[in-house]
Image (cartoon, rainbow, N blue to C red):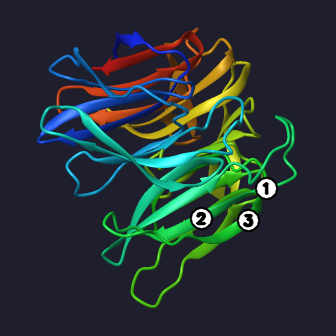
Amino acid sequence: MRFEKKHLTDMFRCYSTQYVTVDGEERVLLATEGEGQALSFSGKDYEKMESVWDAPGGTMSMVPIPGRNGAFLAVQNFFPTFQAEKSIVVTAVPKEDRSWEVTKFLDLPYLHRFDILSGGGKLYFVGCTLCTSKSSKEDWSDPGKIYVGELDMDAPMELKVIADGLVRNHGYSRVNWKGTECGFVTSDQGVLIVTPPQKDGDDWTVEKLLDEPVSDIAVIDIDGDGEDELVTIEAFHGGNFLIRKKIDGEYKVVFKYHKPMDFGHVVWGGKLRGVPTIIGGYRREAKELFWIQADKDEPLTFRTGTIDEGTGPSNVAVINHEDRDIIIAANREIGEAALYFVY
């Protein structure tokens, strides 16, 4: 693989990444976790920069709303470090003049990750709060929760709690698990799988998959044997970047990234140029963005490579095109919004 970097713009505390399609046009989104903007980039080489909002900032997550022509939900008012008692979810709707109409959707203090899942022909909101309250940065005495509700953009949403007691409820990944769209939620209590109702009358299900404290997770069949592996950062903002494979009914560590790392924050699994690939990143030490692929099956070994270093990425999103793939990177520690074209 060959990587070609494009600097999009300087953005203080660049944190959140996403992309949407508006009237057939692809738009890349990046937003700060500090006070400030969310920006959209479009055009053949993503040279057209436009504001989605100028304030307030504090954006942890952005999630497209299915069937809404590029409209998306986003967190605002979750500021460093963990100043999120006033965090909200907003709706951003694209307008014909290329501006965005941004309105408050709901209040949910300390909302860090959220998603929209489908089940039984309906859409469901999943919201994961890092904690419930805080008296200081180091106070974790009031754990986080998982909130869910049926999502109807034309009606108020009623939330309920399906899991609580989740200390440092930090990571989330949408996964097609055994043929069903689910959410994987990570905290000091391990990994939970939350599954929305599949038909009227059903309830949410919550299943414990792993007991180890986990900060972030991706799920991918990295070796092509038909069974998914777990890719985890352990523990909270930790220095262990691991691949866990199911062996004798348990998820056992078969790989640990070899370089010293701290403040691990990026973990993604998917395909780059058609090959199953993991992307990882961390915000201290060498501040790398790196890739991992399976090398040999018997015995299972892996190869790795550096995409960039000294950048301290917080999050990535990936767009797969026929002629190239695009990694959208929030290079938080150098205040940079960037793309990496993969050939």
Q: Nearer the viewer, residue 28 or 141?
A: 141
Q: Amino acid at mark 2?
A: Tyr
Q: Are marks 1 and 3 in contact (CB under 8 Å)?
A: yes
Residue 333, position in %: x, y? 60, 15
Q: Position of residue 274 (x, y in %)?
A: 30, 37
Q: Secondary structure at mark 3?
A: strand
* Marks 2 and 3, the one that precedes in the sequence: 2
The residue to which callout 2 is attached is 147
Q: CA distance from mark 1 to mark 2?
A: 13 Å
Whether residue 219 is visible here, answered yes or no, is no
Task: Verify CB contact (< 8 Å) between mark 1 and mark 2.
Answer: no
Disc 1 secondary structure class: loop
Q: CA distance from mark 2 to mark 3?
A: 9 Å
The reply to whether residue 167 is visible in this rendering is yes
Q: Which mark is residue 164?
A: 3
Q: Nearer the viewer, residue 162 or 134?
A: 134
User: Where residue 235 sits in the image (x, y, percent)?
Assistant: 77, 40
